[in-house]
Image (spheres, rainbow, N blue to C red):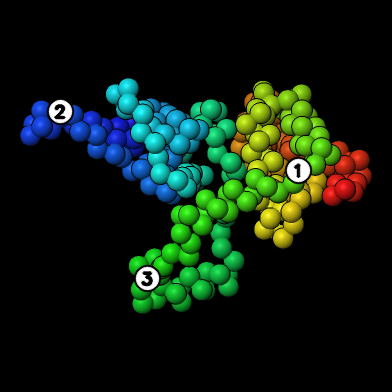
Amino acid sequence: MLPNDVSGVSIFNDAIKSFTFMPGPVFANVVLADEINRGTPRVQSSLLECMAESMITVDGNQHVLRKPFFVIATQNPVDFHGTYPLPEAQLDRFLMRLNMGYPLPNVEMDILLTQAAVNPINVISHVAEGSDIIHCQSLIRSVHVSELVRDYIVTVIAETRQHPAFNYGCSPRASLALMRASQALAAINGRDHVLPRDVRDLAPSVLAHRMPLKLQARSEWPSSISVIEAILAQLPMEKWEKDITS
C-alpha cells in the first residue's frame, strides 16, 4: 500500500480537463486498520493528520472528514516478520490500547453457535445514528472534573516523566486523553462528575502504549502496564478521595 491508498488521490479527468479528488477509505465514520503494523511507515504516517485534525491534505487541498470519526487498529502480537513498529507520534494519537486475548470457553461456544448457519455481520443492524454519537460526545465534555481530579491526573503524568523505566514520559495529549476517558467512564456509570478511581482504573489502558520500556528496564518490568500500575500503587488515593462534588 501507498499513503494515497489510505488518504485518497487526485486523478486527471480528461472530460473536464482537470483533476478530480478520489477519496480514500479514511472518509468514513469508523476506520478499521487491521494489523496496522504490517503497513509501511509511510502508510502509517498517512493516518497522523486525520487522527489529530479530522482532515486530510492532498495536493495542498484540505478535505474535512465526516463526523463522528475515529480509528480502530489491531496488531498481531504473534508474528512480527515483515512488520513495522508504529512511531511514537502515532501511538500517542490513539486514546487507549486494549489486549483482547483468547475468549472464555462459554464465549467461544456462543461464537460457534451464532456462526453455524450464517455470519452475524451479514445481518447486523445499526444501533445508533451518527448524530446520536456526536450528541453523546458533547454530553461527555459536560461531565464535571474537579480540581482534585485534575491534580491527580497531572500527578500520575508527572510520575511517568521521571520514572527510570521510560525513555520519556506522557505528553499533554495523554493528560487530555485520560481526562476524556474518565469523563466517559463516569457518564457510563451514571455520574455527572469524575472520581479519582475512574482515572486510576483507566490509566494503564490510556497511558501504557505511549511509553516503551528502556532496553535495560525490560529485565525488571514485564511491560509498560506493570510500571503504570506500580506508579498508581505508590500514590495514596486518600489524598484525592475527598468530597469532589461540593
Q: Earlier in the sequence, mark 2 or mark 3?
A: 2
Q: Residue furthest left?
A: 15
Determine the residue positioned at 24% across, 34% down: 21
Gap in angstroms between the C-alphas marked 1 and 3 = 40 Å
Determine the residue positioned at 90% across, 46% down: 242
Gap in angstroms between the C-alphas marked 2 and 3 = 41 Å
Determine the residue positioned at 36% across, 43% down: 27
Q: Which mark is residue 18?
A: 2
Q: Earlier in the sequence, mark 1 or mark 2?
A: 2
The residue carrying mark 1 is 145
Q: Quadrant of the N terminus?
A: top left
Q: Nearer the viewer, residue 3 or 115?
A: 3
Residue type highlighted by circle 2: Ser
User: Mark 2 or mark 3: which is in front?
Assistant: 2
Q: In the image, is residue 210 above or below residue 205?
A: above
Q: Position of residue 85 (x, y in %)?
A: 49, 32
Residue type highlighted by circle 1: Val
Q: Which mark is residue 123?
A: 3
Q: In the image, is residue 192 above or below residue 54?
A: below
Residue type highlighted by circle 3: Val
Q: In the rendered image, is residue 223 in sight?
A: no
Q: Position of residue 207 (x, y in %)?
A: 66, 38
Left or right: where 172 falls relative to 75: right
User: Mark 1 or mark 3: which is in front?
Assistant: 1
